[in-house]
Image (spheres, rainbow, N blue to C red):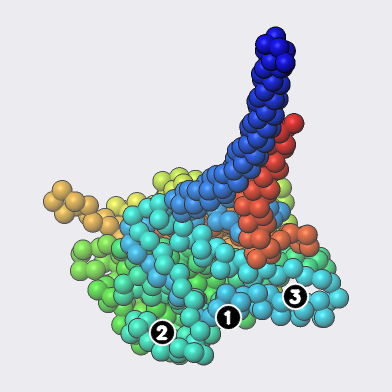
Amino acid sequence: MSKKEIDEKKVEKTVDEVKETAEKAKDTAEKAVEETTAKVRNFKKLKYGSMFYIAIALVIAIVVVLNFMVGMFAKRSPIKIDITPDNRYELSEQSIEAVKAMDKDVEITVTATKDYFTSLGNYWENYYSSNTGVPAEIPFDMIPELLDKYSIYAEQGKGSINVKYVDMDKDPDIINKYKKYYNGDINRGSIIVASGERVRVLSDTDVMNMLSADPVAMQSQQLKFRFTGESVITSAITSVTDAHPIKVAFVKNMNGMAVYDEQSYGSAAQIFENEVFAKHGYDCTEIDISTDELKPADYDMIAVFAPSVDFNEDMIAKLSAFLYNDGQYGKNMVYVPDSSKMDLPNISEFLADWSIKVENELLYDDENAVGTDIFGNKQVQNVIADISSREDVGDVSNDKLYIVAPASRVLTKIAKNNEDVVTEVLKTKDTAFTVNMETYDPENPEYGEKGSRTVVMRSKKERADGFNTLSSSLLVIGSPGMFNQQLIVQNTTFNNSAVLLGIMNNMTGKDAGVVVPDKNIQSSFIAPSAKEAKNIQIIVVWVIPFIIAAIGVIVLLRRRNK
């Protein structure tokens, strides 16, 4: 083989080796590219998969943090999520401001579990449904919900309200600490409101009466319910936190018998004592004017309601001595005459000493009256009265509501040579006229001239003591019918409760009372219960935001993967 052939073979071999090396390099490069591409794909999957889970975790964390912040904020400024048609699970502005203004700590102990209120509502709903054939909605479960709101709103002030529920069947001794300051019975289903040594107990009957059928609606064959519980609870709270409670001697008996006609005035007398006084922080003690002492050291005020018989001289002397208070004055009295009793000379003389006369005339008004009412087994006009002395009444939350004085006696000022300061507090419209009780003949009635007349009058005796002025006051309310249950309880229609309470508070110097409007329960069977409302809140605040966020993250990641 020639040298040339040998060289050609070497060249071919070298070329083949180069080709083989190039092919190996190509295969290696392609393999490396494939491996790199696979790694990139895996990295992208890992990257976006991790982002998905990280995003979900962030969403959950954000929802948790936001809800925690909302919960903390709600304790200081409650978020109102009440979708009921009557806002039954919310406190009124009057109650909110009252608990914010507290500077003391209050304990509210409920002698039942929360389930008790649900069972109570179910019982009464079945009762009314069975007896009337009409489905009724009686949401007693709103009571524990409102108690929680009291606690929350109180944190915005200087005081606090702690609510707890105890099972008397399991732990009956839990209430022993309250019996030191409360002599009555405490049963299952009661609500105990306490602050220090001040204790008010809302009995199980009081609690059941917080939701009651509206008597006016029932007269029209309608079944509607009214909730008075907020007013009762708020009054109990303000009562036990009142630094200067007014002590009232309520003249109930004379020689063991009621001073008023129980058939005609029994209900109004109870309203006067309980709804106007006791409910709004006045400490009432029922006394017998003939046998009990009336010491100025024991009481700040005395109340006499519609006496049907005259007081003797000793009883009158008690009243005068109480108000005079050894020259120190500082006492007050409220007197409400019977609408039909005329021959009470000793009481009339006592009133005359204060420059006030109760005339033997009744007031009527055909133009300015809000219908008629049954009072004392008689049909009477609800004659409209206006505020004549704003200073004596004070501020009223709603001046548009009616003040009515059914079957009121006319009150006049007696001109005497004394220094009594007499003020006309409430007066009728100019369209009112009088009927003489002594000469009235139903078959041939005669009426007095039209004109504005006084139905509430205040007389004040005072004297100077250095730089101070000492005084005592006598307030005469000409209409016992002003304390008719419907006129006092229906505080969304009539202003009697707010106005009368304002007069009492201004006369005694008591802190302004709180008149909370009642709630008219609107039957709506699609309205949620308290438990259902909480479930709705969980769904709205937690579940729905999480689902929306999760869907948004999934859509975002899917788009980025395309």
Q: Residue at x 47, y 85 (%)?
A: 186
The residue nearer to you, when weighing 491 against 500, is 491
Residue 355: which quarter of the image?
Answer: bottom left
- Mark 3 to mark 1 CA distance (whole Å): 17 Å
Q: Residue at x 65, y 66 (%)?
A: 531
The vertical placement of 185 against 138, above or below, is: below
Q: Tag 3's secondary structure?
A: helix
How crowded pointer 3 is (Cα within 10 Å; few <14, some 14-19, many 20+) is rated as some
Q: How many marks?
A: 3
Residue type indicated by callout 2:
Ile
Residue 343 percent across, percent down from the top left: 52, 74
The vertical placement of 189 against 512, above or below, is: below
Q: Quadrant of the C terminus?
A: top right
Residue at the spot of label 1:
205
Residue type indicated by callout 3:
Glu
Q: Tag 1's secondary structure?
A: helix
Query: Seen in the image, is 209 located left or right of residue 148?
Result: right
Residue at the spot of label 2:
175
Farthest residue to the right: give it. 133
Residue 71 percent across, percent down from the top left: 50, 53
Residue type indicated by callout 1:
Thr
